[in-house]
Amino acid sequence: MVLVLPLAAADAAEPYPLLEEERHRWEACVAGPPRFDLPPDPPRRIGPDIATTIDADRSEYDARSGLITLQGNVVLERADQRLQADEMRYFEDDNLAEASGRVRLGQQGLLVGASGGQLDMARDQSALQDVEYVIPETLTQGTARRVRTEGATLIFLRNATYSTCEPGNELWHMRVSRMRLDRESGRGEAWHARLALWGVPVAYTPYANFPIDDRRKTGLLTPTISQSERTGTDLSLPFYWNIAPNYDATLIPRYMSRRGLMLGTEFRYLQNWQSGELRMTGLHDDDVFGDDRWSLSWDQRMRLWAGIRADAMVNRVSDDEYFRDFGTTLTDSSTTHLRSRGRLMYNTPDTSSRLVAEGFQTINPNIAPRNRPYERLPQLLFIYQPQRFGLGAINVQTGLHTEAVRFDHPEPGLRDTGTRLDMTPRISVPYERPAGYIRPSLAMRLTSYDLDRGEPNIDQPDTITRAVPIASLDTGLFFDRNFDAFNRGLRQTLEPRLFYLYVPRRDQDDIPLFDTGRTDQSLFRYFTENRFTGADRVGDANQVTAGLTSRFLNRADGREYFRASIGQIYYFADREITLRPGQEPETRNRSDIIGELQARLPAGFLARGEIHWDPDAEQTTLTGARLSWQPERRRTLLTAGYRTRREEGDLELHQGDIALIQPLGAHWLAMTGWRYDFNEDRTLEAFGGLEYRDCCWSIRLLNRYFREDAMDEPERAIMLQFEFRGLGDIGDDVDRFLEDAVFGYRDVR
């Protein structure tokens, strides 16, 4: 022990005003309340060799009893503990300190102000009276008649209050006769707890168990309540069961006044070799639908042996209207097909193999049976791509892509079914340098079909083979220059690229379309070998794609401020291979010009744009633009988007949207958005709302007007959410809706 004895004197004072002194913590959190973080440091371990340091204005030492009496600005420090007081008695033999007057104890994860108390350093315990306390990690504060600590993790309180609100401005607080806070488990327990709002008692429970950080614990979760025309009053009361560190389950009884009681469950498991989630819901005899309703979703992942993995995904619902009636988001209600799939995978450094079985449940009744997707029962994929090997100064890259798949259909008499074997061996001799690259490539696509013909193709051949050679040459150069602008060192790049592709014509009209369609035009697709997706069509080509990209980068950290790209295909021959027999070949000698741009502008602006220009028709075929404004260190977000798409000269898509998230002072937040269809001259979605946020609570109210399809009748909904930090939230998940509806919303939360 070290004693330092300055000469200054100090006067006695009242108990330490801890909550007033620590008020700045709540003032700093108004812009964004903190998360419940796990303890940042492991519990301390104090041994007998830890030194104790005491500083005071005056001291007296009794050698017989080993008692040191200290007065005036007394400070005792040991490990992470710091005890301050006006007066203190330190018993050297017992390693015990008794403090009185203006007492303050600080240790890992806890600040306490008191009128008096003891610090037993031998047992790593403390006991204090007339207490104000703060837990800085979670901005939890309160008062207590007595507080006792054991180590760095256990805190016991009697006749105490508990709140996450600012001291003296408490919307809610909990008053308890006893409370136990365990930072190691992340849970709190309270006995005879009374919850008060604005000082008015509103609830009582003889026992409560609640979180003090983000870790899992068995217990009731916050209920949700909403109102809609489809379900009526909709109330859910989830119960979370923390079965084991690697198992948990959530049971969700959901009462809907118009439909009845639905029971849902979610079970999650995690082991060394497998993990997964199982979700199920069930509603007996829906009062509106008139039958049982249910859903099943299972996602399973496994690591079996070295390099061998497997996964399974099963999704099923009882009927076509399930998501429309019970879906919680617009994405749910617009779902048309549910995929179920199982895969077995084996990978080595040079190979990748997959065995897949895949099927679909069509839940859109407007899709005709013959137009429903094919099932793959099964599909075998094998990819071989060894490391490059050298032939003198030449590097050679080889590869093989192989697929064998059986296609079945829910209506086999209406559609062709059968087996397809597709192999593509490839060889490339790339030459790559910092200034550019040349990548010549030769491939041969070999495909065979063994078919069971359906109407109206019964007279077509059952066995088909196809061999299509593919030759390509991909070249690019990199130019750059350094310059200074806007008080920054910048680098501008100029990256021209040419891609030549030759594929001879092979007649493919007899081949059915199992999984093949036209690709969407994009700058990326201009540099690929096939204008079709899937293996059922290989487009003939004699063409060259020219592209140019320029970027502006920060020389110091490589941050990209600006990127612009442009590209176009020049055709040397007509494209006679069409998706369906009888379609007219493509005779244009040049493609649309596609331009893409992204710019990070000053003051938090971000601009993105894409345009497709048809030089023959002299009109745009696709336009997409978005401008966002998000100033640094502010929760403001303004975003606006515009989209058009033409098909055969007709404007198929013409929509725009705008959204604003704007703080109104320190606590209020306004949010509004609008999405409009110019073709149908009607609003697709509009919403507006307000949020009040404090350090300890928030409320969000939002009015929504929407159509699931442009031709549907509009629906309206009022969304209301209360959140009490440290207790949970009640109502609609407004945050989730805004994440889906507002581009970039997640970045401002």
Image (cartoon, grey):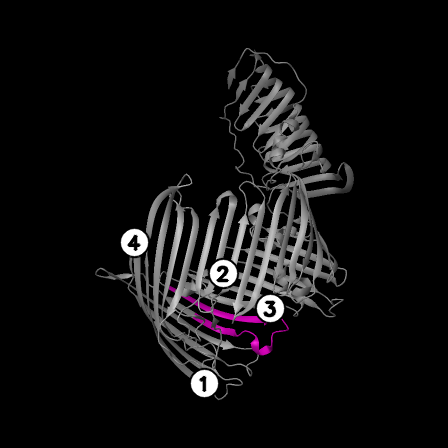
Q: Choose between 199 and 79: the one closer to the eye.
A: 199
Foreground mark, 2 or 4?
4
542 in the magenta segment: no
Give how far across and how far down residue 28 sits, in percent: 60, 34
Contact between marks 1 and 2 (CB within 8 A): the answer is no
Residue behind mark 2: 302
Query: Marks 3 and 2, Cα distance to the nearest angstrom?
Result: 29 Å
- The residue type indicated by label 4 comes to Ala
Image quadrant assignment for residue 462: bottom left
Distance of label 4 from label 1 (alpha carbons): 52 Å
In the displayed structure image, the side of residue 143 where residue 93 appears, left or right: left
Looking at the image, tell me whether mark 4 or mark 1 is earlier in sequence order: 4
* Residue 104 sits above or below residue 540 on the image: above
| Mark 2 in CB contact with mark 4 (< 8 angstroms) | no
Camera-side mark, 3 or 2? 3
Residue 157 rendering spot, x and y as whole percentages: 68, 33
Between circles 1 and 2, the one closer to the viewer is 1
Front residue of 261/323: it is 323
Q: Which residue is mark 3?
A: 336
Seen at 57% across and 78% down, the residue is 370
> Judging from the image, what secondary structure is the residue with disc 1 in?
loop
What amino acid is found at the position of numbered circle 1 in the picture?
Asp
Residue 367 sits inside the magenta stretch: yes
Q: Which residue is mark 4?
A: 435
Judge from the rendering whether residue 544 lies leftward or rightward of residue 405; answer left or right.
left
